[in-house]
Amino acid sequence: MNIGVEKPMINLHPHPSHIAQVIRDIADAYTWTSFTFLYESGEFLPILNELMDLYKLGGPFITVRRYDLQLNGNYRAVLRRVRKSDDSNVVIVGSTQSLPEVLKQAKQVGIITEDYNYIIANLDLQTIDLEDFRHSEANITSFRLFSPDQPEVKKLIQELGYPEDDNERNITCPITTEMALLYDAVQLYAETTKTISFRTIPLNCSDASVWDKGETFGNYMALSVKEGLTGNIFFEAGIRTDYTFEIVELTSAGLNKVGTWHTENGLTTSRTMPSSDVVSTGELSLANKTFTVLLALNAPHAMLKQSTVKLSGNSRYEGFGVDLIKELAEKLGFNFTFNIHVDDNYGFYDTITNVSTGMVHEIMEGRADLGVTDLTITSERESGVDFTIPFMNLGISILYQKPRKDPPKLFSFMDPFSGEVWVYLGLAYFGVSLSLFILGRLAPPEWDNPFPCIEDPTELDNQLSLGNSLWFSTGSLLQQGSEIAPKALSTRVLASFFWLFTTIVVASYTANLAACLTLESPTSLINDVKDLADRKGGVNYGAKSKGSTRNFFKNSEDPNYIKMNEYMIAHPEQLTSTNEQGVEKVLGGNYAYLMESTSIEYNVARICNLTQIGRLLDEKSYGIAMRKNWPYRDKINDALLELQESGVLSKMKNKWWNEVGTGGCTTKSEQSEAAKLGMPNLGGVYFVLLVGSLIAAACGIIDWLFFVFRKARHYQVPFKDALKEEFKIVVDFENNTKIVRSTGSIYSRNSFSTIEANDSEESSEH
């Protein structure tokens, strides 16, 4: 209250020097060696000046920051600088209008935690909604001029029509310091008017005229002592003195009084003030603490439990993420309450616009302590929240229908052998037939009497003509036999090896033919991501419209992924809002869905005509989300490591991916295409046939030469002439008949055949 025009004479509001003394005394009680002084604007600088005068050169190190320089009430930039500094002690001096947003954004950037201590030099903290900060475990201390529990304050609340418990706004007291000071000023003015009689005169506000009784009136008020709503009202040199601040601390139950500060006696506390040395997060205990855990209903991470009875609370949910929280809670001893995140968007945090969405937004706002689902760890999300160590590794892959089998081909009976084997089989067939024909002409036993009734035939026939040799090979190859039977050693050796060859070839063909006709070769329009990018076969594709999978293609520099991103931008109808919609589109045909591999594994295990195509496109991990600088992060990480090392996480994944509700798709072995037999498989058989053919050829040549030698000696002709004459008979392929002569004739050396003919005639005359 100011009386007069020249200068203020009395002021009911606490002087900046007193506010500075309260800050100093609380900081000293906390044994702060340094702190950050965070103020709103220039009107609060007198408090800083007084504080600096109190400390002079021997006080703690003070870092001064101003938080109203950002546009549109965005204080996150300066708050991040506080987080990156070494100071965990903060003094906030600002107006009641800006303070709620400052605290909210401080929590978002992760500095409203157990690691931080705050002194809030605002006398109206009881009028601010502190619900979101009551469970933050940050040490928040403030001071006020009056207590909401005072009878006078409660009476004033009733007179003004405020409800006693303002639960809607979650505030302690609706009466502000300004309202209380105004109330006391009016009461003081009214009391003074009862004592001093005066005559009022009109004043002109445009000139310098003053009320002649004003100074007297003000002096009386300054010398008066009155108990008001804000405590004892007494002035020295116009400055209010001899009054008391209540020291309050924010707890889970709200603002609690922990001490007082008097202008003469200083700070008095009802308990020992906590030290500024924050306990290491590794030593924090989670026992008996209760956390809010945000779930997203996405199988198999979290699902509504099917039951014949009505369930309530945490028992309504099941899944991998639910079991994971239960295991952590059992190991660390904390309690938890599940809340459902209804939005399909898991969210992100944009550092440029300072906008957060989805599950990330809920955690940053403090409405949840933990977030568990198939939440991928990304740089965008880590700007707003922290993550535990990964509890599952994965990557993006392609979900597509299983390849369909080819329709039966007209010449599918040729599939058991490769083309190379068929070519070599044909060469073997003709080669053996030709060898049999030649050896038959060389071997004397193959020249047989065509008329068994005649003892001395004049002609001999050879049954192994070229046609008969081909027929014999055909019958052997088809395992049907023929009326032709080799007689000579050489031809029998060749036939034996060929029979061995055909037995193995036919057996191999029969066995592989059954496999080829039973296991038809499946074909797929796409085999990898390049086929998908090129839209091979006209296959459409898409992904979840919001999430890490879509962002991967937006940010990728790979040419194929850039092409795919352009396609998805041009065809938004191919994008889905949920993974379930993507699976349905795949089942509809001619559509591939880009999806995280863990989700693909889950769907493939339950829908038997789905499969994963190609390799993983990237590598990423799932983690449990929590607010920035959460003090229990290390404890959670240690427990997760123990679960990994003991194999608990692996068993949990096997349970929810491969056991619960799989439908048998994972245990059913996939039929693969029967491989064609090639030369590496049958090359040995051909080698045996070649060796047998060489042995047969050697036997035939030796037998023929021995026969020529006996003939030449018997007829007493040179071996050379006899060999020449027999060779002519062998190479006369058009003639399969050989003339036989009498053994008693005398032969000329000119022509072995002519001598045989004459000898035959003489024998007939005798």
Image: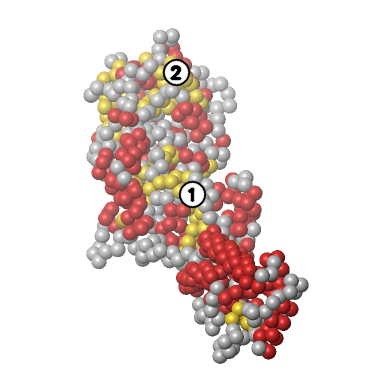
Q: What scheme was used to colour the molecule?
A: secondary structure
425 relative to 7, above or below: below
- SS class of the residue under badge 1? loop
User: Depth check: 326 or 400 in front?
Assistant: 400
Horizontal and vertical percent position of residue 729: 69, 75
Mark 1 / mark 2, whichever is N-terminal: 2
Residue designated by label 1:
395
Label 2 residue SS: strand
Tell me which amino acid carries mark 2. Answer: Ile
Mark 1 residue crowding within 10 angstroms, few (<14) / some (14–19) / many (20+)? some
Dot 2 surroundings within 10 Å: few (below 14), some, or many (20 or more)?
some
Residue 153 seen in the current view: no
Expressed as whole percent of the image width and height from the top left, the position of residue 297 reads 39, 56
The amino acid beneath tag 1 is: Gly
Quadrant assignment, res 494: bottom right
Tell me, for residue 655, which label it has, or none: none
- Disc 1 + disc 2, Cβ < 8 Å: no
* The C terminus - image quarter: bottom right
Residue 382 seen by the camera: yes
Give the Cα separation between the discs numbered 1 and 2: 48 Å
Residue 545 in the image: above or below residue 239: below
Residue at image location 65% in from the left, 84% down from the top? 459
Labelled disc at residue 62: 2
Q: Position of residue 187 (x, y in %)?
A: 34, 30
User: What residue appears at the point 51 percent right and 26 percent down from the top-left corner?
Assistant: 66
Query: On the picture, is 191 further left or further right than 563?
Result: left
* Res 524 → quadrant: bottom right
Task: State the residue at coordinates (43%, 27%).
Answer: 92
- Image coordinates of residue 677 in percent, x first then y, are 53, 64
